[in-house]
Structure formats: C-alpha cells, structure tokens
Image (tube, rainbow, N blue to C red):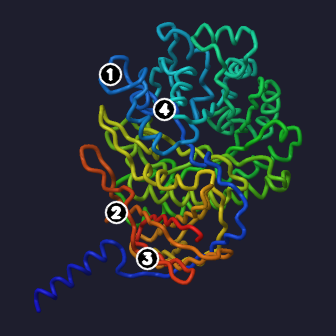
Amino acid sequence: MQKHYLLSILTLLLISQLGVAQTNTSTVIYHLDSAEHQISKHIYGHFAEHLGRCIYDGFWVEEDSKIPNQGRIRTDIIEALKELSIPSLRWPGGCFADTYHWKDGIGPREDRPTMVNVHWGNVTEDNSFGTHEFFELCELLDCEPIICGNLGSGTVQEMAQWVEYINSNNISPMTKLREQNGRKEPFKIKYWGVGNENWGCGGNMTAQYYTDNLRRYSSYLKDYGDQKLYKIAGGGYGDYYDWTETLMKDEKGRKSFDGLSLHYYTLNKTWAKKGDAVEFGEADWFSTMTKTLLMEEHIQKHTAIMDKYDPEKTKGLIVDEWGNWHDSAPGSNPAFLYQQNTLRDALVASVNLDMFNNHCERVKMANIAQAVNVLQSVILTKGNEMVLTPTYYVFKMYKVHHDATLIPHQKKSASYTFNDKKIEAVHTSCSKDANGKIHVTITNLDPNNGQVINCSFEGATSMKALKGKYITASKMNDLNDFGKKETIIIQDFMDYSFKKGELQIKMPSKSIVMIELEEK
C-alpha cells in the first residue's frame, strides 16, 4: 500500500513538472476553404550587424584561427544556419549602417581604413568584413542578402554608387573597381534598406524630413539590367503610427519604396533596466509575454494606415528588427548586447512568427535580431564551442511554413492569469505547403497549466494526422549551455488524436507543438 502511495505521489509530481496537472480547454477552427495568401519565407529572415560578437568572433574568425572556417567564415555556423534554410540576412545594421561608408570595406584588407564603432562600445572596426565578404557569406548560406544603406551620415552619391558597384553590368568606374577587387559579374542584390531608424540613431529626423530624403535618395537608386530593387523605407518603432501616416500619405513618397519597415523589441521592464535573461520568475515571464503580444496591435494599426493609402496592398510591411531584449549577460561588455536564451525566448519567437504568418497578406519580411551572439540569437559561440539556442529550434520547427499558403483560423483561447491580469494562453497559425501537407503550430504561454486544444477543419473532406513535434522544458528559465548536452530541442510529440474530423491536442504547459496532417 505504501509503495503504491509513493508511486502515485511521484507520478503526480512528474505530471505537475510537465505542466499537465491542470488542463484548460481551447478551441480552434481552421478554414481550409479560405486559404489564399502565401506566407513568404522571408518572414523567417535574420539580421547580422557589426555589433559585439555577431560579425567579429561570430561569423568572422581570425586569419590564423584553428576554428574550422572557409575564408575566415566560420563553417559550423554556416552549417547550422543552412539547416534552418534561412531565406535572407540583413547587414551591416542597424544603427551601425548609418555610420558605415562602404568603400572603407573593399579592396585589399591591409589597405582598408579603420573606424570607431560609435554606437556599440566605441571599439575599433578594422573593416576586414565588407561588401565582398558579406556576399560570400550569403552565397555559402544560399540566402538573399539585404543591405541597409547609409542615409544618416552618408550621401546620395555614396549610396547610389554602392548599388551600381553591386548590381551594374555596364562599363563604369564602379564596375571596374568591383572587377579590380576580384568580382567581374554583378552580385545582383534585390533588397535594399534606405536608412535605418532615422527617427533615432539614423539621424534624429522628423517623419517629413525623412520622407523628403527618402524620395531624393530613391530617385538615384537605379535598377540595373533585369535586377529590380525592392526598396525598404525606414519605418517607425512600435506605436509610431504618425511616422507611417506621414510616409504613406505622401503620394510621391509612396512611389519611392516597396516595403516599409517596423521595429519592435520585447522589453520585460524598461529600456534602462530590461531584466535578466536567465534569472527571472513568473512575474517577468508574464510581463514578457504581455509585451510581446503588443506586436499584434502594432501590426494591425500600421496595416490599417497602409490600407488607407494602399488598399491593393502593393507595399509590404517589413518587421526587420524584432525579438527579446534583456540586460547584457553579467561579466560581458554591456555595449555588445550578449544575452543567454531560455525557453521564454523560444515562446516569444513562436508567437511572433505565428503573428507574422497570420498577417502575411501585408507582412512580407521579418528579421530576428540577431543571428549570432547578439540579443535573441539563434546561435551562441565561445571559442570553438557553439550552442544552438531554444530560439534556433523554433525556427527549425517552423520551416514548414516557408512559402506555404496560410490557412486562416478562429480561436477561443483559455486565459493565462497572473495575479489580477490575464492574456490568451493559446496562439497558433496553420498553412498548407506545395506538397499538400498541412502544418498546425500552437503555443501555450501558460507556464503552469496544460491545454486541451480541440481543432476542427472547415472545408476539408477527410484528413489524417501524420506526426507531431514539440518544444518544452521542465522550468521556464531552462536553457542550452556550453559544455552540456542541449536539452531544449525538437522532440517527438504523441499526445494528440484525430477522430471524426477533429484534432485534439493535449499540450504541456509552456510549450510549442507542431502537428502535420494531410487530406486523404
């Protein structure tokens, strides 16, 4: 009797640890008969700025480094990112972009001038990683390059010549210079950012002053041959709706860009004191999830303004900086923005990606900040060691949505309540890929309670579930660390059933689940 009693207690403790001691019920209806809009793979883009250890001591190793590399580009990072099928990489910034003069980063490396990185720690930048190195990196990754041009401290001529240097196949001083530097054929870049955060670090401009400059700069950023530029205007931050209004209502201004950027970082607390990346409790967890869900409101309101002036949705909303921003890790240079990455970050990634998917009619690109060793990284390095973060595995799980067709949904979510406040616990998106496979991704933000999710599929004839995967951990601040086996990874998920056209998923607390289905 005592033995069975102890076994029961241990079982209850285990169930409690996995977050299924108490379950709440949510319902979702997926409308297969309304599937119409494509989820651009570029929603799953990444960002690499000359900041801290993202480029130098991240992607780019020393000349005599014993870390395996190809032309100083670290190969284990390349292999890991290729596993994610990253579609695009934004460079060189960020705030750094509006202090960067591209001609400093071409030619023989021993002849390149140095500069001081005034935004990120006043460290000396040797310009050994420049335009050619960036394109070599993108070729190794098999991804689209995104260049952010210097509108803040640069000139129209400088930016126009950079486009010519990269894209032109004519005979000109710029193409001759490119050939002298080892590249005869043009690089052919499509995506071009015309400045960055020009309301702040990119020049402290007013919206109208930036709009006027955008029109001027854009006039000289030419298409060469069959390579058309997709020009991304520097948009606002979070709730800077007046900035979007000013840009969109200017008819000539609208004609000068194809996409409008939006930046929003999830801050647990304030800009001055953001909170620790690892040492946090449920109050910090709840605050973080509440703040990250504001992205939905920002997208909706910026989209409403864009719809007013662009009802045909010819302009894309480009969320080219997003993610968690915590205090820098203790003992690190605070200007380098190095932070660890826990299960909390993984769930922030999944709910944001679901939001971008669900707004894919307007959201055409997003770039998480940043790829390596900075902010919400997918990869961390220390010497020759490398760690794939929980966020990495979210991007790997969500590859199924790349260029798939969005299946709209309606949901009735249970609440996640903390003290006297509540948010929706369940967040989801669904898509159908080119092979006819249907993928449902669902996140349960509640760190204490499991969820029973009852899913139905309108417009389907007969379906079957093929497999399930999930990401979770026993504690909300669990992480993958150096010198230890990674524990927050994608695992097989079996706790689902499909009967009479309804999918029932029994989700653990604080988890992300993906179910693959197909129509019979």
Depth-wise, is mark 4 or mark 2 nearer the camera? 2
Between residue 329 and residue 20, name the one nearer to us: 20
Q: Is residue 2 visible?
A: yes
In the rendered image, the residue lying farthest to the front is: 520
**Residues under numbered marks 2 and 1 in contact, where contact means CB atoms less than 8 Å apart:** no
Q: Secondary structure at mark 4?
A: loop
Q: Label 4, label 1: how many angstroms apart (C-alpha)?
A: 20 Å
Displayed quadrant of residue 155: top right
Q: What residue would you read off at disc 2?
A: 473
Real-space Cα separation, disc 3 to disc 4, in angstroms: 42 Å
| Mark 1 vs 3, N-terminal side | 1
Out of 518 and 271, give the one closest to the viewer.
518
Sooner in the amino-acid sequence: mark 4 or mark 1: 4
Q: Amino acid at mark 3?
A: Lys
- Residue type at mark 4: give it: Leu
Of the residues under marks 4 and 2, which one precedes in the sequence?
4
Whole-number angstrom distance, CA of label 1 to CA of label 3: 48 Å
Kindly report which numbered mark, 4 or 1, lies closer to the viewer in this rendering: 1
Percent from the top left, x then y, of residue 266? 53, 54
How far separated are the C-alphas under marks 4 and 2? 31 Å
Secondary structure at badge 2 equals: loop
User: Is the residue under label 3 in contact with that under label 1 (CB below 8 Å)?
Assistant: no
